[in-house]
Image: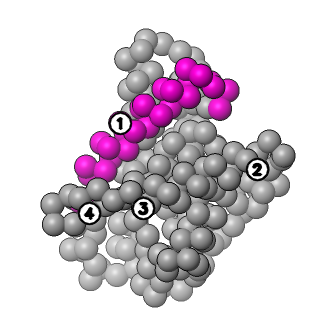
Amino acid sequence: MHIAEGILKPEILVAGWVLTAPVVGYALYKLDSEGIPKVALLTALFFIGSFIHIPIGPTSTHLVFNGVVAAIGGVYAFLAIGIALLFQALLFGFGGLGVLGVNTFIMAFCPVVLWFFLRKAVKRGGSRFTTGAILFIGGALPVLCSLMLLVFMLYINSTDLEYATSAILIFNIPLMVIEGLISLFMLHFILKYKPQLI
């Protein structure tokens, strides 16, 4: 779900940095000695997840884990995802440095906002079904929201990309279900053995 370098107009790139940089700065300001290993772990999770490819029809998609990263990291998700995207750009040429602000915002904004509310619902408790549904939604919905932001960025950039945006949405819908299930199992395990992480 990266936007490659050279696609977006300069004003969109600047807007991406304007939206992302203050939140990353705030996360760095709040970062303490306990938060550093958490950010490192979440960065590794996001980084490695992008190399797990799932074939879907004539193409494939990859895991993103942005819901899980936000569930555990909160605002640190901006920092973890930004660092992972930076390393992907430097080491493998995925995305790029100029578009890093936009890509970080696309992948981190929705999950962080969503988990701000879902975390309260999880801590309130409830039936196993209710908790499971919340954990599933917490993994699936961030993917959909990130896809919608990606499509929106491409649309405001150029109307010539309408077919590409439709294909992006269609081929990533199965990813939502997969991410939701992974989130359900991972976060259920964490709630059972280390609930203070969420």
Q: Earlier in the sequence, mark 4 or mark 1?
A: 4
Density class for disc 1 (Cα within 10 Å; few <14, some 14-19, many ≥20) is many
Q: Earlier in the sequence, mark 4 or mark 2?
A: 2
> Residue at coordinates 32% horizontally, 44% vertically from top-left?
178
Q: Earlier in the sequence, mark 3 or mark 4?
A: 3
Q: CA distance from mark 3 to mark 1?
A: 18 Å
Q: Earlier in the sequence, mark 2 or mark 1?
A: 2
Left or right: where does residue 197 sit relative to residue 151?
right
User: Would residue 191 be counted in the magenta stretch?
Assistant: yes
Query: What residue did someone put label 2 on?
Result: 36
Identify whether 97 is placed above or below 71: below
Tell me the magenta residue range.
Answer: 171-197
Query: What residue did someone put label 1 on?
Result: 181
Query: What residue did someone put label 3 on?
Result: 51
Q: Are marks 2 and 3 in contact (CB under 8 Å)?
A: no
> The residue under label 4 is which amino acid type?
Ser
Q: Nearer the viewer, mark 2 or mark 3?
A: 3
**Image quarter of the C terminus:** top right
Pinpoint residue 23: horizontal percent, then vertical percent: 69, 58
Pinpoint residue 150: horizontal percent, then vertical percent: 40, 65
